[in-house]
Amino acid sequence: MAHAAPASGVRPPELTGRTRAPDLFSERTHRIAAYATPVVLGLVYGYWAAANRRDGGPITGWNLLFGFVTAAVFAVLWVVVRDLAPRMRRELHALSWGAFSGVAFGFLYSQTGYSILRSCAFGAVIGAGVFFFVFYRYYTREDAEGHRIH
């Protein structure tokens, strides 16, 4: 019976203990992305909120101010959740991202002119969906004590 010979001297990942993909970016790139991501997402969110608020009307100074203030608040809250959530247990970690996304969506929806009850209901549905997806992700990647599995 014939057996295939290994093509190279590289050991498979299960024998080396290394199962993660290699990091392609430098530490500097990750540091830049840590600052750029909330700024870019905040600007997109602020523009979206300002566009919803003006409802196709003219762009005014107050509309620009509203967009930039909304962008700043979103970016700051994103950084707070991003930095504090990983230190929490998986339930609170998922709850913090669910609450953040639900409130963010509900606020955007409220700028369209619909009732606050409808905005809260849609925000709660989005927040619950994010909570369940994120909880499942963390639940499948942590051991029983809450330590991340690498």
Image: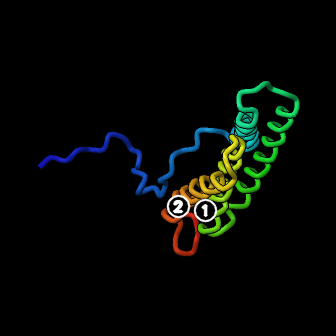
Element marked by disc 2: helix
In the displayed structure, would residue 124 be above or below residue 35? below
69 relative to 145 in the view: left or right: right
The image quarter in which residue 30 lies: top right
Closer to the camera in the image, 16 or 50: 50
Q: Residue furthest left?
A: 1
From the image, tell me which residue sits under label 1. Answer: 94
- Image coordinates of residue 99 in percent, x first then y, are 66, 59
In the displayed structure, would residue 121 be above or below residue 27? below
Element marked by disc 1: helix
- Image coordinates of residue 85 in percent, x first then y, are 68, 61
Q: Identify the residue shown where x is 65% and y is 48%.
A: 105
Q: Identify the residue shown where x is 52% and y is 57%.
A: 133
From the image, tell me which residue sits under label 2. Answer: 132
Q: Amino acid at mark 2?
A: Phe
Determine if residue 8 is in view: yes
Q: Identify the residue shown where x is 80% and y is 47%.
A: 73
113 relative to 5 in the view: left or right: right
